[in-house]
Image (spheres, helix red, strand yellow):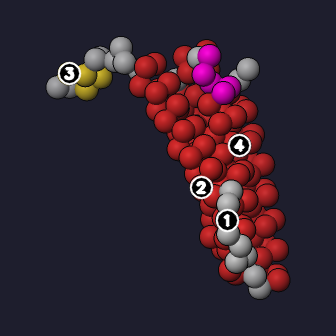
Amino acid sequence: MKMDRLYILTGFLWLIAGMVFGVYLGITDQLQFANSHAHANLLGFVISVLFGLIHRNWPVLMASKLALPQFALFEIGSLVLVAGKYDIDGGGGGVLAPPGSVLVVMGTLVMFWMFARATADIKLTSKGAV
């Protein structure tokens, strides 16, 4: 599976959803949901696309057995977190925000682990990477 493409396409879906949500918020003057809107765009679009570009620049990451589980962990976590933020912004208890946050952090830690392991063979000298 081409994880770079999957991440970037998913990021664009987040962006479209976030833009539509933002337009709706502006039209209906429900600006109390601005934080939810920002979380959707930053986690969903920005981080997803960044993770996709990381995969593209380090193709060895796509071969990792952790690549697809990491993607699922991060994206499900983002969805759960944004739903929790929406509930909080609407005056609710936001019970989904804490587990969503944990999933997002776990997904990011797995990405960090994958990247650190894949790039561990890079040696640095005083003149840069060799």
Asked if the residue under mark 2 is in contact with the one under mark 4, i.e. CB atoms within 8 Å, the reply is no
Q: Is residue 73 above or below residue 60?
A: below
Q: Is residue 124 above or below residue 54?
A: above
Residue highlighted by disc 4: 76
Q: Amino acid at mark 1?
A: Gly
Q: Secondary structure at mark 4?
A: helix
Based on the picture, tell me whether residue 68 belongs to the magenta stretch.
Answer: yes
Residue highlighted by disc 2: 98
Based on the picture, tell me whether residue 98 belongs to the magenta stretch.
Answer: no
Q: Earlier in the sequence, mark 3 or mark 1?
A: 1
Task: Mark 4 vs mark 2: give the one in front.
Answer: 2
Q: Secondary structure at mark 1?
A: loop
Asked if the residue under mark 4 is in contact with the one under mark 1, i.e. CB atoms within 8 Å, the reply is no
Task: Mark 4 vs mark 3: give the one in front.
Answer: 4
Q: Quadrant of residue 28?
A: bottom right
Inter-mark Cα distance, 3 to 1: 48 Å
For disc 3, the neighbor class at 10 Å (few under 14, some 14 to 19, many from 20) is few
Instruction: Name the mark on residue 125.
Output: 3
Q: Secondary structure at mark 2?
A: helix
- Measured as percent of width and height from the top left, residue 25 is found at 77, 76
Inter-mark Cα distance, 4 to 2: 13 Å
Q: Amino acid at mark 4?
A: Ile
User: Residue sitting at 28 percent across and 17 percent down?
Assistant: 123
- Measured as percent of width and height from the top left, residue 88 is found at 67, 70
For disc 1, the neighbor class at 10 Å (few under 14, some 14 to 19, many from 20) is some
Q: Earlier in the sequence, mark 1 or mark 4?
A: 4
Residue highlighted by disc 1: 94
Q: Quadrant of the C terminus?
A: top left
Inter-mark Cα distance, 1 to 4: 16 Å
Q: Amino acid at mark 3?
A: Thr
Seen as rendered, the residue at the extreme left is 126
Q: Earlier in the sequence, mark 4 or mark 3?
A: 4
